[in-house]
Image: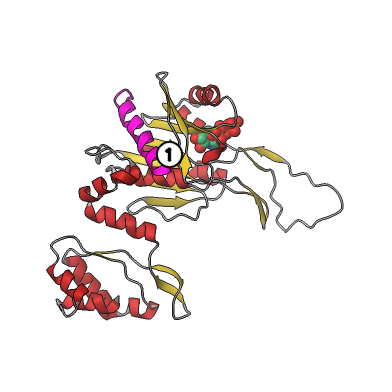
Amino acid sequence: TANIIAKAAAGTADDLLSTIIAAATVPVLFAPAMNTAMWESPILQANIRRLSGLGFHFVEPARGELACGTEGKGKLADVAVIFDAALETLGNIGESGAEAKTGAKAGAEHDLAGERVLVTAGPTREAIDPVRYVSNRSSGRMGYAIAAAAKKRGAEVLLISGPTDLAVPTGVRHIGVTTAEEMHEACMERYRDSTLVVMAAAVADYAPVNAAREKIKKSGAKMTVEMARTKDVLKSMGAERTGQLLVGFALETENLVENASKKLKEKGLDMVVANGVSGIDSEQNRVTILDSSGGVEEFAPMDKERVAEKILDRAVALRGSVQT
Ligand code: CTP
């Protein structure tokens, strides 16, 4: 890639790709991959600066093991990151192109412009000792899909997530946390600046009272870990809210609508997305959306990207009735 970047920066057109770049009247996005020293070389960086100044786009390489056997920056960015960057680069053209995948409504792309959206995602981990923890099967996909969708619809998005394997969507600010306590602190510090909060994280309800400082050695006896309740982030937000639209999730294995509706009232929410366990760690989710005006809408199973759009559609529809 260093070579093609150099050719593009010089305007050289001596093969198919460089000729296409030289003649292109559409946005051009580079996803470079190369040896770390090559990536850091002043010549390459100067070429990138020149091209960026001329309106070309770049996805930075990732860190990792490289073809030459070394570790460092230079790995091709994750395909999902390149895909998001391509959509971002294409702007509205990309949005309608993505419609088939996401189910986004044409023309609704920037209906969240001006909104400051806080999304939480993923599990939390509660330490038992330095090597063990209590957690859950949440992958974070639902929350990440909501953050990506909100960003594409024009919002300023902050994603606070527990540990996941997912790439942060392009243009989304991210804060990583590990425990329920850290999730509570990070959210309470920032939610006042938000206009819409979507709490998709699977926050632990209990955490070990005292994490052991050293690794617990096994013995012949049974072992009991004493656990205490964590703080409920949504409930704290509901109690102190200053005009935010609050959306929670409800994970239920029985009496879905009844239990979700209880959470809606007890936590002082505007909307609850109720789902069963089949959505955990899955590409798809089957949800029922309840709102504070008594609305209940049940959806068939669909990709989490589409579910994200449905949730945001409902939030936009409710927006008018909530004081800001
Ligand atoms: N939640 C939270 N803080 C917690 C626990 C849950 O903010 N300590 C949020 C979740 O992010 C979700 C909603 O509360 O949006 C409901 O979470 P869920 O696990 O379905 O229910 P709980 O409130 O934990 O109740 P229970 O486990 O008894 O069903």
Q: Amino acid at mark 1?
A: Met
> In the rendered image, is residue 287 in sight?
yes
For the N terminus, which image quadrant?
bottom left
Q: Is residue 215 left or right of residue 182?
A: right
Callout 1 secondary element: strand
For the C terminus, which image quadrant?
top left
Q: Which residue is mark 1?
A: 302
Residue at the top extreme of this rendering: 294
Query: As rendered, which of 160 and 139 lies closer to the eye?
Result: 139
Image quadrant assignment for residue 56: bottom left
Q: Quadrant of ligand 1?
A: top right
Say which residue appears at 80% left-offset and 47% top-offset.
223
In the displayed structure, 29 sits above or below 10; it is above
In the displayed structure, 36 sits above or below 159; it is below
Image coloring type: secondary structure
Query: As rendered, which of 299 and 147 lies closer to the eye?
Result: 299
Say which residue appears at 24% left-offset and 40% top-offset.
110
Q: Is residue 133 left or right of residue 303?
A: right
Q: Where is residue 152 drawn, in percent x and y?
A: 29, 46
Main secondary structure of the magenta stretch: helix
Image quadrant assignment for residue 72: bottom left
Query: As rendered, which of 294 and 323 lies closer to the eye?
Result: 294
| Image: magenta residue range | 302-324
Say which residue appears at 36% left-offset and 68% top-offset.
61
Q: Where is residue 302 drawn, in percent x and y?
A: 42, 39
Q: Is residue 43 left or right of residue 196?
A: left
Image quadrant assignment for residue 42: bottom left
Query: As rendered, which of 270 and 34 lies closer to the eye?
Result: 34
